[in-house]
Amino acid sequence: MNSGEYLRYVALGDSQTEGLGDGDDIIGLRGWADRLAERLAAVNPSLEYANLAVRGRVAGQVRTEQLGPALALRPDLATVVAGVNDLLRPRFDAAEVAGHLEEVFTALTATGAHVVTLTFPDVGKIAPLARPVRSRVIDLNDGIRAAAARHGVTVAETAGHAVTTDPRLWSADRLHASPLGHERIAAAVAHAIHLPGSDDAWTLPLPPQAVPADWQAAAAELRWAAAFLGPWLVRRLRGRSSGDGRTAKRPQLLPLSTTPDSPADTGPRESP
């Protein structure tokens, strides 16, 4: 199938695919998957789009909770992006996480769907306090590439491009992309599937900006830890997730111009 002929696009994943960092729970979330759907619809106005992603989900939950509904929708294009929540957990097994993703790849490609995933940038360059998990990101990316290769899954290689760790592509929590970051991810996936009108412009660096002094950078780290890292650790200790009580924002295939009848976010309002 040519990339301009997709009729049914289904997105699976966690908060990044749900769209956190691009809009909010009051005005609504957009996100890279919505932006990709817009690009697809510009080529084929008949496109229908569903987004099954829910914040806080680890790869195993994406497999157990989202794969069945995705298969029932019979997509001809599916994006599967998960694993970041896994690598932030105390116990992390890259092979296990990649195994969950591979099960999703296997099932979706067996139906004839074109499946797309992506690799992750070095989180240590985005949030210096996250440098200890850098090796986990490398291992996870290697596992994703290997699993994708075995099933003909397209990989949008966002890892390795310096622009993907530019702070301007990330929201204040440094975990979710900013609106500009979501736009770059959508462009990366569009380029990976050779969508008409797409190119590699998403890899280009942003204009230079002033480098903060050491004391300013240190102060920013402290503010980030207090505002985001601390609350995240508290939730982990309490066994809670930002996705508790939430469901997919767009569980059914609908034309892009159609808004789901009921809001997807039924859980408490809290930081992702």
Image (tube, rainbow, N blue to C red):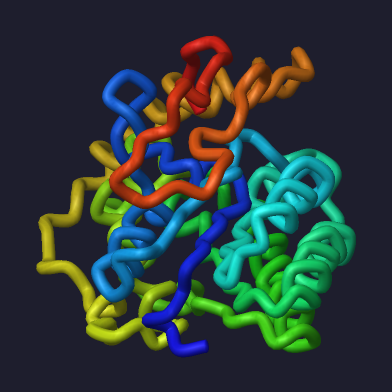
Q: Report if residue 225 is visible in the image.
A: yes
Picture quarter containing residue 237? top right
Residue occupying the far front of the picture: 46
243 lies left or right of 164: right
246 lies left or right of 196: right
**Could you say where residue 14 lies in the image, as x and y percent from the top left?**
60, 44
Picture quarter containing residue 141? bottom right
- Above or below, 183 against 194 in this view is above
Residue beneath the point at 32% across and 34% down: 220
Residue beneath the point at 57% across and 64% down: 79
Residue beneath the point at 74% across and 58% down: 71
Q: Report if residue 218 is visible in the image.
A: no
**Could you say where residue 260 lies in the image, as x and y percent from the top left?**
43, 32
- Above or below, 2 against 129 in this view is below
- Above or below, 33 against 151 in this view is above
Residue beneath the point at 78% across and 63% down: 104
